[in-house]
Image (cartoon, grey):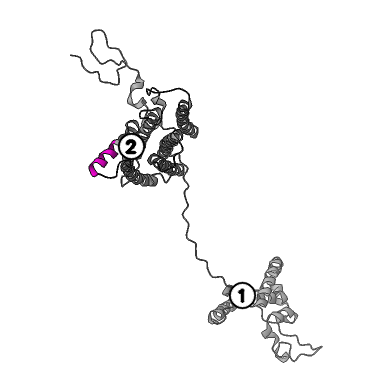
């Protein structure tokens, strides 16, 4: 009794003569890890997809051209020998092409299902719609080859007794409309991320509606040849459009699974920080004076540092005209109240020296100024730092003048 050879890691070696063991009769390419996957049959390049769509349309055009050529040729066909190219007959090339197209569409739906089933964020199992799509495509393929819809319409008319003879096609038209409408809405939601596939599905729906109306006989009659060409062309182009749409969406799903789609990521907007209220100076004169004093301070800082502190203290207070301009309160005092009051020209008495401004006194003045600013709550036209800076500049001018 022969034993079934099981593949192992060391099956490349030939067993010794007289020994019994597994032997590999095929190349290593037969193993599963080297076989083509389902997604490998889906074209990724846009050029290949375009060529496949053009090939489908070319096949439809070739079948229609052959039908028109035979119908307009002087060849007589009393025994029906040329029914294979007559698109109005059952079992023609048009029926075969439609059946093959819908069969390929069913295979494409199963390929999409095999990829969509692995999506991690599909918690509700929306991928199952592709199983229903494959089943409907397979049913359409059988119907195109055998004319199953006519059998269904006749059976329903015989059971129900409606509609009258000559309008039996309403049964399969209503059944197909209910199925395709429900499935089409669901597929439109599935194909929405791919704008090209969604547009193809919309075009396919319009073509199927036009083909159904032509099959029922809504359009005016223009002759047997023209009617057969219009009806068969609309049906085959609709099938080709359906297969092209599924091919485009299968490419989209494959690229999405491989992470090759260009996705635009919107950055989260950061909350705006609240702006602090700005303190503005209401008094225009004080603002202009502060601007000028900034420039004067920048120019006189270097000169002030070079001057010795003793020189600044020994100068008389009478040579301080700038101090009077910046301190209006001192200018408003009477003339007899100053340190030179009571002295005459030529007197031998020397005037008393003015009190020198020390660092302790300056610190005390600063503290007093801060206390005055804290107490003055009603004056809100200037900020605290602005008032402090103006007073500091006034003291500097007094020191320079002294």
Q: Is residue 72 magenta?
A: no
- Of residue 204 and residue 187, the one placed in the foreground of this image is 204
Q: Judge left or right: residue 97 versus residue 315.
A: left
Q: Nearer the viewer, mark 2 or mark 1?
A: 2
x 47%, y 60%: residue: 271
The residue where tag 1 is placed is 281
- Return the mark for residue 364: none
- The magenta region covers 151-165
- Of residue 246 and residue 13, the one placed in the foreground of this image is 246
**Could you tell me which quadrant the C terminus lies in?**
bottom right
Could you tell me which secondary element the residue under label 1 belongs to? loop
353 shown above or below 30: below
Q: Where is residue 98 drawn, in percent x and y?
A: 39, 32
Q: Where is residue 387 drawn, in percent x and y?
A: 60, 76
x 48%, y 47%: residue: 264
The residue where tag 2 is placed is 134
């Amino acid at each position: 009794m022969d034993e079934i050879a099981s593949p192992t890691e060391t099956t490349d070696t030939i067993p010794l003569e007289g020994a019994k063991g597994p032997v590999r009769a095929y190349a290593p390419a037969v193993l599963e890890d080297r076989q083509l996957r389902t997604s490998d049959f889906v074209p990724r390049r846009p050029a290949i997809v375009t060529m496949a769509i053009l090939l489908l349309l070319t096949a439809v055009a070739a079948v229609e051209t052959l039908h028109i050529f035979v119908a307009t040729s002087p060849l007589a066909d009393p025994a029906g020998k040329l029914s294979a190219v007559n698109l109005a007959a059952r079992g023609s090339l048009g029926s075969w092409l439609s059946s093959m197209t819908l069969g390929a569409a069913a295979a494409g739906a199963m390929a999409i299902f095999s990829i969509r089933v692995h999506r991690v964020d599909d918690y509700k199992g929306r991928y199952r719609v592709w199983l229903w799509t494959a089943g409907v495509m397979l049913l359409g393929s059988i119907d195109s080859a055998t004319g199953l819809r006519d059998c269904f319409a006749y059976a329903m008319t015989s059971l129900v007794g409606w509609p009258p003879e000559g309008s039996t096609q309403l049964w399969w038209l209503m059944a197909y409309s209910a199925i395709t409408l429900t499935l089409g809405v669901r597929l439109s939601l599935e194909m929405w991320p791919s704008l090209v596939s969604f547009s193809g599905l919309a075009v396919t729906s319009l073509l199927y509606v036009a083909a159904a109306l032509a099959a029922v006989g809504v359009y005016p009659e223009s002759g047997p040849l023209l009617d057969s060409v219009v009806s068969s062309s609309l049906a085959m182009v609709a099938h080709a459009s359906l297969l092209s749409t599924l091919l485009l969406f299968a490419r989209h799903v494959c690229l999405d699974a491989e992470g090759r789609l260009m996705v635009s990521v919107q950055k989260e907007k950061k909350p705006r920080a609240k702006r602090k209220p700005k303190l503005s100076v209401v008094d225009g004169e004080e603002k202009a004076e502060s601007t000028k004093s900034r420039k004067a301070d920048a120019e006189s800082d270097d000169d002030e540092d070079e001057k010795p502190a003793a020189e600044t203290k020994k100068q008389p207070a009478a040579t301080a005209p700038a101090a009077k301009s910046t301190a209006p309160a001192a200018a408003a005092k009477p003339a007899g109240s100053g340190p030179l009051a009571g002295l005459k020209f030529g007197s031998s008495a020397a005037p008393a020296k003015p009190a020198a401004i020390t660092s302790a006194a300056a610190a005390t003045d600063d503290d007093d100024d801060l206390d005055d600013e804290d107490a003055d709550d009603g004056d809100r036209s200037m900020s605290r730092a602005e008032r402090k800076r103006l007073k500091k500049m006034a003291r500097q001018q007094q020191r320079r003048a002294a």
